[in-house]
Structures are given as structure tokens and as C-alpha cells.
Image (cartoon, grey):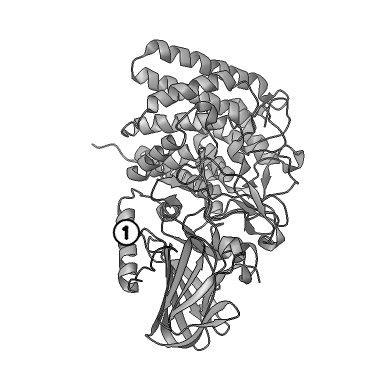
Amino acid sequence: MTLRIEDYAMIGDMRTAALVGSDGSIDWFCCPRFDSGAVFAALLGDRENGRWQIAPAEEFQVHRRYRGASLVLETRFETASGTVLLTDFMPVGENRSSIVRVATAIKGTMRMKTDLVLRFDYGRAVPWVSRLDERTVGAIVGPLRLALHASVPLAGQDLHTVGEFTLQEGESASFTLMSSPSHLSPPLIPPVEPELDQTMTFWEDWTKRTELHGEWAEQVLRSLITLKGLSYRPTGGIVAAPTTSLPESVGSTRNWDYRFCWLRDATFTLLAFINAGHFEEAEQWQSWLLRAVAGSPEQIQTLYGVAGERRLDETEIPWLDGYEGSKPVRIGNAAATQFQLDIFGELADVMYHARLAGFTPPFRRDQLRKLFLHHVEENWRNPDEGIWEVRAGRKHFVHSKAMAWVAFDRAQRAAGVTEDSAEAARLKRIADEIHADVCANGIDPERGCFVQHYGSKNLDAACLLLPIVGFLPASDPRIKATVAEIEKRLMVGGLVLRYGSESGVDGLPAGEGAFLACSFWLVDNYLLAGHTGKARTLYRRLLALCNDVGLLAEEYDPRARRMLGNFPQAFSHVALVNSGLNLMHAARAQRGANAKPPR
């Protein structure tokens, strides 16, 4: 039976990640990087496409949590005969990725089973499997080797590696699946306990640097840990999600590969890390960003590979049936070749906030800014594919134009800081021209609200970003009207849709869930407008959508009450962090305002 998206939890080592189901099955794992081929692909097919289950051999109930502030997952299986704790983690700091699993009997006696199905190249290639000894097997396809060492006997059965064992109270069984290049000798598999201790120490040391105080601190910290787990440690890039092709509508073709790094995430991610006290991650992200976009501004892409790769050609995999039959399964993302004007605004905002935070200027930062500003000056009047990466033709999207304004607004502020008054004045003139154009053409004259694109009557939740980036204050009648119209026409079950998909603007079949980041943007709008009670109520509702271990997908279907889209989704967690930080800041400010003055 297919698990729901929310039934999974993520473990990771900041090189790649794996999704562990509530049934003890790892159904998704790409190796050696986030964007490498999957060796466990049952998530998008069936168990013969690769999975690794460790579970009781009888009916069980399950409870899960992360151990402390870490990505070490604990799954508690309870049966009529006993209780077993399954601990899953990926050691941090190695040059290769490993999955370590430890089953420990807490109470009574329990029969357990393990079933390892290795299928390389997204579930298609059956590897050569060699028995190295009674408890170790190795598997090779092409450049990758995986070796499994277990503390219990293993056997081959119908191209599976299986084992059955019984644990009595206090006994444990351990398993380590380690990757390595196939042309080298297999590495020695280290003992489990030191690996677990080192991994816990890493996460404990990292979370100690987190500066969070307030009602929402625990949930915000969990999202920060998730974002850290989605980072690619060698370069500092952060993937949008560790998965591909989890559908935005079950049975639909809205299935995309999110295992890449989007520029528009830059400002939100940077602010989240800075505001939480993680300057090292923010500097790494900024450095990755500027390395990735180096070169001609005409060639800046919307997204890149984790090391800055530019070729992300989109293809379809016919041998996988897709999650709950949602085809096609896609590898790569054609949005990398689109023109999306808004990314230049996000890029300028990254540089501006990095300067405010006192970051060391990366190589050629100022030169790069001048080049892309010239490019935006020449192209901001042109239509684009927009923040939602539509595939039905370019439009004059309001959000895109507003972010072009952000590019010049932030640049003129930076020029003012350096006392280049003439350049600051020139940049301000361009910003004012774009601002006037958006206000003249991006508003429905009858309703007085911002619309999706020039000449349209349709709404777009991306317009909720306008007051957040400072395009207009939340008190402006046009922003008030926009929020009111979005509440009236884009909310389903108390959550915000991106836009009306039935309009056909994206060139795809209608129907999708509520986009969770948009609902967090509404929280921020309520706060900016002084509606703290509404902001807190909506934020609580959004937190209640997190699964049992605090994770969110890209979307949520309020009718079917289930998550949709790739999982866990960085954009959702960045929005959760920033809204939570804003709420905690507002609470501190309110407490300060209510404090009695000293006598």
C-alpha cells in the first residue's frame, strides 16, 4: 500500500537524503548526491524499483520523532509481544554517504525482518551483488558501489537481500549501507556507536548557535534543521527538495524535479539563517549563489545544480509509474532555460542584506551587480515566465515587474551607502519608472487590487510579496484590496492557492493543492497590517499541517487533508521560519511596549 507523503521522514548528511516511511521502509534515496540516480525509487514505483525495509514481522503500531535537535530519526514499533526502537541516521562529515540503521528491543521480544532491494538508475538497473562474508554484501552498477554490513545473517532471495532475526529486551541489530566509487577497494565500515555519537555532536553543536526565543522557537528550529539537511555541504547550495515528481495533484502531470537550487529562494533563505544567528550558512549560500551566476547576465538561470551546474535537461522516465500513478516522472527541469525577471530582484536583495549583515564581499560582487542591473534595465519591459514558471507563454507578471523594482531599489540604497549620489539618483529614477508602470498597469481599476499580469482579472498570491519586499506599505489601499480579494477568491479551507489554475495561464491541467509558502506570506501581511491575532491564528493552523516529525511538503489539499508536491520542501520551511521569526519579534516588541517605564 502506498504511503501518504506525510508518512515519510527525512534523514540526510548534507550530500544527499533519504525518505523513511512510517512502515520502516526507505523508499527514496539518491546517491552520491541529491541529484544523482535513485537506488531506492519505490516512492515513484513499487518495491521492485528499490527500497529497504526493517520492521516487525507481525502487525505493529508506530510512533516517531527526531532525537533532540537533529536528523537522527527514531521509529518506535509496538506489537503484542514487545517494543523495538529503530534508529535511522546518515553520518555527517564523511566524503561518502552511508545509511545506518539500529533496531533495539526496549521491551519484551520481537521478531524482525529486513528486506533490501537495490535498483540503480531510478529503479531500472539490477546490480551485480557479491557476498563478501555471511553478513556483508556488495552491489555494483557502473561507477557506484554500495556495501551492506549487518550484525545479523543475510541471504539472497529473488534479487532481494533479506534477513529475519529475533530481538529480546536489551538486544540490538545494526545495519550500515555505505557508498563508494566502484573502481576503488570497498572502504572499511566503521562501528555504529561512534558514528551515532559524532552525528549527534554535530547537530548539537550546530543548534547551539541558533538564536531563538519565543513561543514558536521549537517549530522554527526544526525547519532550520531541515534546511540545513537540504544543503549540499561541499558548495553551500540548498536544494528545493530531495525528491522529484511528487505530484501537485494526484494523477496529474504537475510533477517536477526539485533536486536543484533556485535563485529566488536566496533572499528568504539568507534572511532565515541571518535572523536565526547562522551567519556561516548564510555566507556559504551567498558564495554559492555568486559562483553559480558568474558570467554574462544574459545567461543567468533560474536554477542550478548543487555545485552550480547549468545543464539540467528535462527528460521523462517511462519505467516508473509515478506516485499513485501520477505520470510522468521527470528528471531535470526545463525551467532552467526560462526567462524569469524576478530572479534579478532576489539577487539584488541577497547582496543588499548580505552587506547589511557585514558579510565579506565575494569576488566581483559589485561588478556582477552592475552587469545584471544593465541587463534588467534593458529587459524589464519584456514579458517573462514568472515566479510560477508557466509553460503557456510569457506574460507581464506583476510580481516579476515588482521584483525588477526591488533590483534597482536595493542597488540605489547600496549606492547611497557608498555616497555615490549621482549613481544612486539614476538608479532611483529607474526604480520609480518601474514602480509607476506596475501601479498603472498591474491593478484592476474596478476592484483596486493587483492582478496576476497586465490586462488580467485573475489574482496571484505572489502579489502578497509586494508589501513584504517594500514595494508598497501594508496600509496602502491597493495592498489592502489585494489581500481582501485573495482572502475571498484564492483561499480554500483557510489556505491560499497560488492562483486559479483553471485560467490556463500555466499551460497545465487545472487543479492543485494550496501552496503553503503563500499562506505564510499571508501571515506576514497580517502582521505588517497590525492584525497580530489573525497572523497568530493562521500560523497555528499552518503548523498543525506539519507531519508528526515537523515536516512540510510544497502543497496541501485541504479537501483530502493530505500533503502534495515534493517533500520536504525548502520554500515551505523557509516561509515557516521567517513568519515564525516575525511573530516572535512582534511579541517581543509588544512586551517591550507594555513594560512599565522605570521609576
SS of the residue under disc 1: helix
Looking at this view, is 436 or 492 the one in front?
436
| Residue 565 x, y percent position in the rendering | 62, 53
| Residue 556 x, y percent position in the rendering | 62, 53
Name the outermost residue toward the left: 599
Q: Answer above or below: position of 17 versus 300.
A: below
Name which residue lies at 47% across and 34% down. Answer: 293
Q: How many badges with numbers are in the image? A: 1
Question: Does any portion of residue 191 appear in the rendered image?
Answer: yes
Q: Answer above or below: position of 425 versus 536.
A: above
Name which residue lies at 42% across and 44% down. Answer: 581
Name which residue lies at 44% across and 77% down. Answer: 85
Q: Which residue is mark 1?
A: 202
Name the outermost residue toward the front: 183
Question: Does any portion of residue 591 appear in the rendered image?
Answer: no
466 on left or right of 446: left
Looking at this view, is 497 or 415 the one in front?
415
Figure quadrant of the C terminus: top left
Quadrant in the picture for residue 423 = top left
Q: Answer above or below: position of 15 versus 397.
A: below
152 on left or right of 25: left
| Residue 424 x, y percent position in the rendering | 42, 15
Looking at this view, is 59 or 382 the one in front?
382
Quadrant in the picture for residue 484 = top right
- Amino acid type shown at disc 1: Phe
Name which residue lies at 56% across and 31% down. Answer: 342
441 on left or right of 186: right
| Residue 48 x, y percent position in the rendering | 62, 71
Figure quadrant of the N terminus: bottom right
- What crowding class fits label 1: few (fewer than 14 Cα within 10 Å), some (14-19), or many (20 or more)? some
